Amino acid sequence: MRNPLARFRDPDPDCACHPTFECDRLLLDATDCPGAGDLAAEPACRGTAISALADREAEAVVTRTDHLERAYEGESAALLVAAGRFAERAAFYDRHLADRAEGDPLGAARAAVGRAGPVGELAAETGLAECAHRVEGYADALRPFVGPPIAKARVAAEPPPDATLAETRNLATDATVRVYEDESALRTYHLEPVEHAFGESALAALARAYELLAEGNVAAGESAPGRAVRQVADSDAPVEALAAALHKHTRGYGVLADFFADPEVSDVFATAPVGENPIRVTVDGERMRTNVRLTDSGAEALASRFRRSSGRAFSRASPTLDAIAAMEEGTVRVAGVTDPVSDGPGFAFRAHDATPWTLPALVANRTLPPTPARYSRSPSSAPGPDSSPDLAVRERPPCWARSAGNSRPPREP
Ligand SMILES: [Zn+2]
């Protein structure tokens, strides 16, 4: 029950995001909001999210317009949740600071830390102080995975923090690859697909063109994506790039086409649960992490496609798959696993190689856990495929769980 002493915050006139909860996620429909749900750049949208989280906690915050989705997870979500928790509880002692925590949680944390008394204690107890301490500003603190809704993957736009750029190259799909190194064991293969350089109007045109295709309002055929784009695009729109992006996401394999456009990439691994595990790649024999992850719906769409092309059930009764995907970039061998041996669909893709995947090979590359029978959806079950050291950073508990003596405090009644 909501604390009757808590203040009821008026909606910010600068934000028209509409919050709802879906399972453990807070969704902000930002379709009509001038801030477009950009939580790093728009304090008003940030306030709407944190105000909603003061009522109910969430594992992730997702904001959506009709042409762009931003998913704030992990440490980004932890900061927003901690701020909501702080705003809710601190309002009793200092209403002004509680209000500030919604639009400017980093500023509120700085103001609260070092204060004697309950407000300073709440900053520590709620995890806000710890979350705020480790970041330099909102661009650093709130780093979403972004992508147009039509994509099967989401991409973290910002490079990894404290990393050094080692190499840049451009791919045939007009994607840009930057390789970063930091103190961790694996280097990062940072992919920027061409559509991530599109402006708002181009992204809106991409979404409208996709609708035309999906509704069957364009004559079918190989050039349908191009026709759809030309029906909706302005004369100054990047028509060819839009058509190529729409083709990639509807006829092609989306972000996989970008990865395999790199002749040095031999393997792409999407480990289940795909929504939580960034894709890993092998580049000229070197394993790297990436800034990309499949969406759950994207993984399901791939599973359906491979089911059709292989004629295999790929279901609970037959949870493994060996298939061939004909991409423009060449033939790619696909190994898939799904429930009950993994937590939803997971895939290993190998370029230019006709050797079928074997179970030991899938265990070795961590597409499949070593003890599938013990691996279930319960997070407290046996170590899954991600307990290896190179994913240890992601496995670190969110910052609220690491704050002193505080493991997810119960909500105020
Ligand atoms: Zn907004």
Image (cartoon, helix red, strand yellow):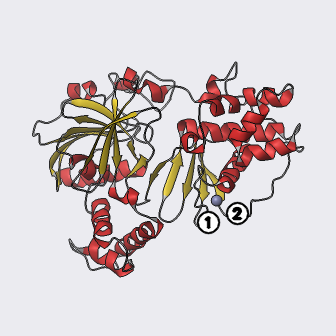
The residue located at (34%, 70%) in the rendering is: 238
Judge left or right: residue 96 versus residue 323. Answer: right
The 10 Å Cα crowd at callout 1, few under 14, some 14 to 19, many 20 or more, is some
Residue that lies at the very extreme toward the left in this rendered image: 354
At label 2, the amino acid type is: Asp
* Cβ at disc 2 under 8 Å from ligand 1: yes
Identify whether 167 is placed above or below 260.
above
Q: As shown in the figure, which amino acid type bears the numbered disc 1?
A: Pro
The residue that label 1 is drawn on is 34
Query: Which residue does the image show at 38% across and 44% down from the upper left?
Result: 292
Apparent side of residue 307 relative to residue 342 in the rendered image (left or right): left
Image x and y of residue 241, in percent: 30, 66
- Residue 286 shown left or right of residue 72 in the figure: left
Q: Is mark 1 within 8 Å of ligand 1?
A: yes
- The location of residue 192, given as percent across then percent down, is 35, 50
Residue at 74% in and 59% down: 12
Q: Are marks 1 and 2 in contact (CB under 8 Å)?
A: yes
Residue 42 placement (x, y as % from top left): 63, 55
Quadrant that contains the C terminus: top right
From the image, tell me which residue sits under label 2: 14
Number of numbered discs visible in the structure rendering? 2
* Residue 184 percent location from the top left of the image: 39, 24
What element does badge 2 sit on?
Answer: loop
Residue at x-position 52% and y-position 48%: 71
Residue sitting nearer the eye, 257 or 161: 161
